[in-house]
Image (cartoon, rainbow, N blue to C red):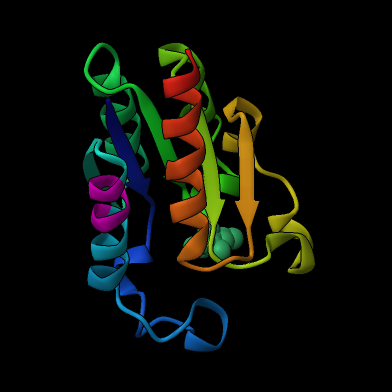
Amino acid sequence: MKILVINGPNLNMLGIREPGIYGKRSYRELCALIEKTCAEKGVECEIFQSNHEGAIVDRIQEAYGKEDAIVINPAAYTHTSVAILDALKAVALPAVEVHLSEIREREPFRQISYAGMACEKTITGKGFAGYREAIIYLVDRFERK
Ligand code: DQA
């Protein structure tokens, strides 16, 4: 099994960016946790981060026929991008949406998630642990099939 983990804009700034909301740990530490979780579960993983909507759409399209599942934190594009929603629907891979913060308790403009409409599951407000939960969910789902 191969999992693609996609992180949207400004997540590369973790640790520096609004630590009161997103924590003090760096993006590198997040990647290490994702890699460790995938290694423990015995699956391959690829991590992709971009600040550009079109690059994220391109990467989702590339996953077709190549990866088995997607974990995605589209960051700010969560709340704006129909293109990312359509790309997820196009490849139709099992996907889980992750947000570090509890978006449901934040500003009104964060209350809609387009990407989430194409995801089987949404995990919010659990910090880095949300990625771990998403990976474990997708591996278990894959192994049940
Ligand atoms: C985020 C929440 C989004 O609203 C925000 O734009 C982000 C990060 C999160 O992980 O909590 O950049 O996706």
Rendered location of residue 57, percent (x, y): 35, 30
Place of residue 131 in the rendered image (x, y in percent of width and height, measured from the top left): 45, 54
Residue 56: x and y, percent?
A: 33, 38
Q: Is residue 3 magenta?
A: no
Left or right: 59 in relation to 18:
left
The residue depicted at 21 percent of the width and 41 percent of the height is 46
Ligand 1, seen in the image, is in the quarter at bottom right
Q: Which residue is pictured at 27% across the width and 72% down the height?
A: 29
User: On the image, which quarter does residue 125 sit in?
Assistant: bottom right
Residue at 51 percent of width and 51 percent of height: 133
73 or 58: nearer the viewer: 73
Question: Considering only vertical position in the picture, is 92 above or below 34?
Answer: above
The picture quadrant where one finds residue 3 is: top left
Q: Name the one closer to the observer, 56 or 97.
A: 97
Residue 49, visible in the rendered structure: no
**In this view, 29 is above or below 134:** below
Judged by its main secondary structure, the magenta piece is: helix
Residue 106 seen by the camera: yes
Q: Is residue 61 left or right of residue 129?
A: left
Nearer to the camera, 75 or 98: 98
Extent of the magenta region? 35-40
